Image (cartoon, coloured by chain):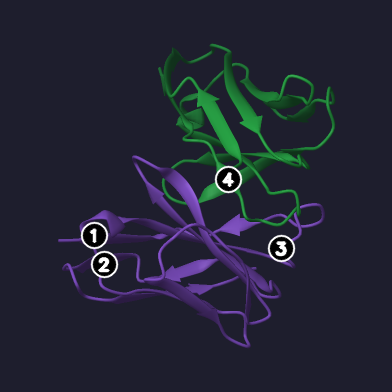
Amino acid sequence: KAGVTQTPRYLIKTRGQQVTLSCSPISGHRSVSWYQQTPGQGLQFLFEYFSETQRNKGNFPGRFSGRQFSNSRSEMNVSTLELGDSALYLCASSLSGTIRTDTQYFGPGTRLTVL
Amino acid sequence: EDKVVQSPLSLVVHEGDTVTLNCSYEVTNFRSLLWYKQEKKAPTFLFMLTSSGIEKKSGRLSSILDKKELFSILNITATQTGDSAVYLCAVPPGAGSYQLTFGKGTKLSVIP
């Protein structure tokens, strides 16, 4: 069974640009979560999607948005990039997003560098 | 706001040593605590703990939860260089969803 895949793996952008990251969950998984990882703040929850609906959202500005498609693939978008958005963006999937019953699997991440 | 604090932040040991990693938490409505290992990029799931005093074990790794004192420990015995990684502790919100609050992690380096 293929794991969680994320594209691209590396990305370099300049301040003010926007970026779209993609995540394909494990086949059959309907919950997709996104996290930002930086050396200073560690891993922080961005949002979670289930059946094309955003179910939970972390404390990030509105520049960070996402969506999920009917095949459970998800994208996240960051507009008006700032230097502080440089981070590893991790996507994780699980069957239904319920910790009690599901294991969550992480993808390899997208390393975003903002210059 | 949920809070997770891990200690130490980094640790260097020799192969064969036993290590104990700590995780303390403050959660409004505690349901569970999760441990992950992050070697390069993708964190991989190790344990989920929900009940106090019950040890979870997988090979040389074991973990236990103390719900009264609000902490968990992760033990690794007979460490190997392959155990070098960042170990992350996380808690979900009371709803039990995967909206995880992570600690900053403990970076473990095992030297031959």
Question: Under tag 3, what secondary structure?
Answer: loop
Please give the residue where the numbered disc 2 appears in the rendered image: A11
Q: Earlier in the sequence, mark 2 or mark 1?
A: 2
Closer to the N terminus: mark 2 or mark 3?
2
Alpha-carbon distance for marks 2 and 4?
Answer: 26 Å
Q: Residues within 10 Å of mark 3 (few under 14, many from 20)?
A: many
Are labels 2 and 1 assigned to the same chain?
yes
* Amino acid type shown at disc 2: Leu
Residue that badge 1 annotates: A113
Per the image, the residue denoted by label 4 is: B101
Q: Secondary structure at mark 4?
A: strand
Chain with purple colouring: A
* Crowd band around label 2 with a 10 angstrom C-alpha radius: few (<14), some (14–19), many (20+): some
Are labels 2 and 3 on one chain? yes
Which chain, by letter, is green?
B
Judging from the image, mark 4 belongs to the subunit labelled B
Looking at numbered disc 4 in the image, what kind of residue is underneath it? Thr
Q: Are marks 1 and 3 in contact (CB under 8 Å)?
A: no
The subunit carrying tag 3 is A
Q: CA distance from mark 1 to mark 3?
A: 29 Å
Between B48 and B77, the one nearer to me in the picture: B48
Asked if the residue under mark 1 is in contact with the one under mark 4, i.e. CB atoms within 8 Å, the reply is no
In screen coordinates, is A78 left or right of A60?
left
**Vertical comparison of A25 with B71: above or below:** below
